[in-house]
Image (cartoon, coloured by chain):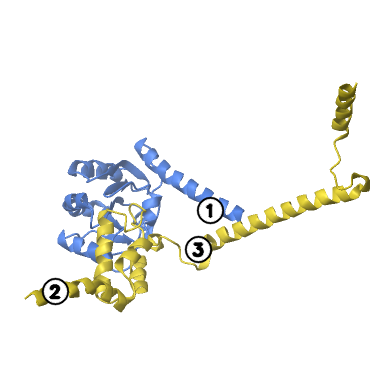
Chain colours: A yellow, B blue
């Protein structure tokens, strides 16, 4: 009797991973990739009635052996692309993927250029005056005030 | 790219304001033009375009099969359709955020015979400044929104009062 019970429990414990392995996906992961059309949060987080219905649909299709892409496509056909938490990387939606990457690259290029120009300008200034011996020359007004202060101190 | 994004954002803000303005205009007693739409029919074949109904009074009811208050008002809308259809009134149910199969079951369960369209992308919801299911609007014969924008289950009195107004507008 114990052996039968243990075998039953073991079969139950293995059932979900076995099914995931069979279809290659779990309902939970698709629920994180889709949004509830009413509340705009992911299906996994939503308690809206339509989200309950969508979750039931996902589980039913998963149990029937549909692929993740098939279930996703059916939900997009019913509710539109707005149910996808991330837009598909195609057509106009590509902008949503490319713009952040392009923006980060452009910002890095601008920062790099500014840093290069700033460092190069300072070097050029030092090189322009051989008597400075690599030191940065002072503003003439500041130099005058400094001389006055030193004269007063020495006097 | 930045200019394009800015243009898209501006368009989104302006279209949202337009929808909000529509609701405010109706509440202020004005009669703005009803946003047009063409959507596939669920309980008939083909599509239905709102503007093709000009010259008739139209009741537009936004609903979904999972919405409980929608069950409460469905018999009232069907009753209004049966009472008023011979006098130039059309009731349209706009089903959105819903499975088509669930919507068809709902239609059968409540014996709905007025035209039901399915708005898979929720296009009309945004254009009408929809605030939740169910919601009912009334369109006069001239194609303008008139009377009340009813949020929540519509009552017999609201239907009668607003249909009469739509027939004279």
Spatial CA distance of label 3 from label 2 is: 51 Å
Secondary structure beneath dot 1 equals helix
Badge 2: residue crowd in 10 Å (few <14, some 14–19, many ≥20): few
Residue B138 in the image: state x and y as whole percent.
30, 46
Tag 1–tag 2 contact (CB < 8 Å): no
Q: Are marks 1 and 2 on the same chain?
A: no
Q: Residue furthest front?
A: A154
Sequence-wise, the earlier of marks 3 and 2 is: 2
Tag 3–tag 2 contact (CB < 8 Å): no
Query: Of the residues tagged 3 and 2, which is closer to the observer?
Result: 2
- Depth check, front residue: B31 or B104: B104
Query: Of the residues tagged 3 and 1, which is closer to the observer?
Result: 3
Residue position marked by numbered label 1 in the rendering: B8
Give the side of residue A151 with respect to residue B153, left or right: right
Spatial CA distance of label 3 from label 1 is: 13 Å
Q: Residue at x 27, y 53 (%)?
A: A48
Residue position marked by numbered label 2 in the rendering: A6
Q: Residue at x 33, y 71 (%)?
A: A71
Q: Residue at x 25, y 43 (%)?
A: B164
> Image quadrant of residue A42?
bottom left
Residue position marked by numbered label 3 in the rendering: A93
Residue B39 in the image: state x and y as whole percent.
35, 62
Q: Is residue A22 above or below residue A28?
A: below
Residue A140 in the image: state x and y as whole percent.
88, 34
Q: Chain of mark 3?
A: A
């Amino acid at each position: 009797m114990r052996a039968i019970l243990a075998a039953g429990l073991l079969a139950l414990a293995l059932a979900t991973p076995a099914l995931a392995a069979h279809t290659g996906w779990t309902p939970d992961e698709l629920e994180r990739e889709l949004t509830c059309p009413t509340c705009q949060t992911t299906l996994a987080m939503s308690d809206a009635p339509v989200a309950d219905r969508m979750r039931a649909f996902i589980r039913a299709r998963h149990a029937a052996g549909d692929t993740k892409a098939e279930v996703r496509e059916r939900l997009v056909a019913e509710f539109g692309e707005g149910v996808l938490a991330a837009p598909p990387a195609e057509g106009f939606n590509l902008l949503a993927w490319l713009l952040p990457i392009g923006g980060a690259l452009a910002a890095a290029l601008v920062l790099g250029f500014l840093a290069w120009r700033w460092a190069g300008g300072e070097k050029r200034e030092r090189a322009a005056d051989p008597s400075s011996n690599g030191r940065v020359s002072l503003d003439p007004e500041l130099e005058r005030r400094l001389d006055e202060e030193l004269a007063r101190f020495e006097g | 790219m930045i200019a394009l994004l800015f243009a898209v954002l501006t368009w989104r803000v302006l279209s949202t304001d337009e929808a909000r303005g529509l609701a405010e205009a109706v509440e202020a007693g004005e009669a703005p033009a009803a946003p047009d739409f063409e959507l596939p029919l669920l309980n008939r074949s083909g599509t239905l375009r709102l503007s093709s109904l000009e010259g008739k009074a139209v009741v537009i009811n936004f609903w979904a099969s999972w919405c409980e208050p929608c069950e409460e008002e469905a018999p009232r809308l069907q009753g209004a359709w049966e009472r008023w259809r011979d006098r130039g009134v059309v009731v349209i149910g706009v089903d959105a955020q819903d499975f088509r199969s669930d919507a068809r079951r709902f239609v059968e369960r409540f014996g709905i015979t007025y035209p039901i369209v399915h708005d898979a992308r929720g296009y009309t919801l945004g254009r009408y400044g929809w605030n939740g299911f169910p919601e009912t609007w009334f369109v006069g014969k001239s194609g303008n929104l008139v009377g009340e924008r009813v949020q929540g289950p519509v009552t017999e009195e609201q239907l009668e009062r607003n249909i009469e107004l739509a027939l004279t507008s």
